[in-house]
Image (cartoon, rainbow, N blue to C red):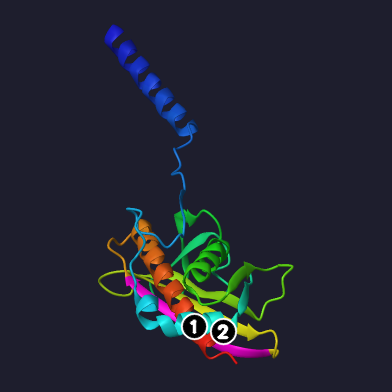
Amino acid sequence: MKKGLLLGCLIVASAFIGGCSQLVPKATELPSFYILNGVKPEGTAIKNDVITSQYSQTAITAKKSVQATLAVNLSTAAAGFDSARMVYSRVPYKLEYFAHSQWIDTPARMLTPLILNTLKAKSLFNAVTLNPSTANSHFSLDTQIIRLQQDFFGPQSRERFTLRATLIDNVKREVVFVRELDAVVAAKTDNPYGGVVAANEAVEMLLEQLAVVCNEAVINYR
């Protein structure tokens, strides 16, 4: 009799504990936030001497003679890439978003100061400012992120970054160039963090390309 009563109490207690466990909310995975700054995780900038090797004394002379100035407009992004959500793709033409990983800000907003600082340091423009600016500039630069996504098409994922750059001659009121710059970097790990590291390398590569094409415009400026 006592054993039966004890067994019954254990069954009731077990059912009660099980019911309570259903009422306790499950722990949700906290989102991880990442930045774009064009720098490797160890804090050293990705080396690329293309500008130094391509433009030497001739470039310096051109800069001094042209005295061209540039106004950088705020970057924009194409549809699907205009939020802080991190994009990946497993099949062509289909975009998906990581559930628990995202950028700390929109890629376009993070990219604008990187473009400004790179062109200030590496371009041949006499001055580089951010629009809106009170100063009148010879040129203005528009940039748009066409894609920034981690592709899982093959055995190893890769980050692809495409940027459309448009340089306007404000004096002549004409387009100097419209260029689509593209960089593809293999991710070391097939997860969001691997894509973030590859994305930062791709950003650095495209900033270097952007400085080169802008410098060509300065040298050919008449």
160 vs 64, nearest the viewer: 64
Q: Residue at x 46, y 70 (%)?
A: 148
For the residues labelled 2 and 1, the Cα–Cα distance comes to 6 Å
Kindly check if marks 2 and 1 are in contact, taking CB atoms under 8 A apart as contact: yes
Secondary structure category for the residue under label 1:
helix
x and y, in percent, of residue 154 in the image: 28, 74
145 vs 123, nearest the viewer: 123
Residue reaching furthest to the left? 155
21 vs 14, nearest the viewer: 21
Residue reaching furthest to the right? 134
x and y, in percent, of residue 131 in the image: 67, 68
- Left or right of residue 180: residue 127: right
Amino acid carrying label 1: it is: Thr
Count up the numbered dots: 2
Quadrant location of residue 167? Answer: bottom right
| Magenta-drawn stretch, dominant element (helix, strand or loop) | strand
Q: Which residues are magenta?
A: 174-185
- Left or right of residue 34: residue 171: right
Residue designated by label 1: 61
State which quarter of the image contains the C terminus. bottom right
- Left or right of residue 156: residue 212: right
Residue 219 seen from this side: yes
Q: Residue at x 47, y 56 (%)?
A: 35
Residue reaching furthest to the top? 2
Q: Is residue 173 covered in magenta?
A: no
- Label 1 environment density (alpha carbons within 10 Å; few <14, some 14–19, many ≥20): few
122 vs 188, nearest the viewer: 122
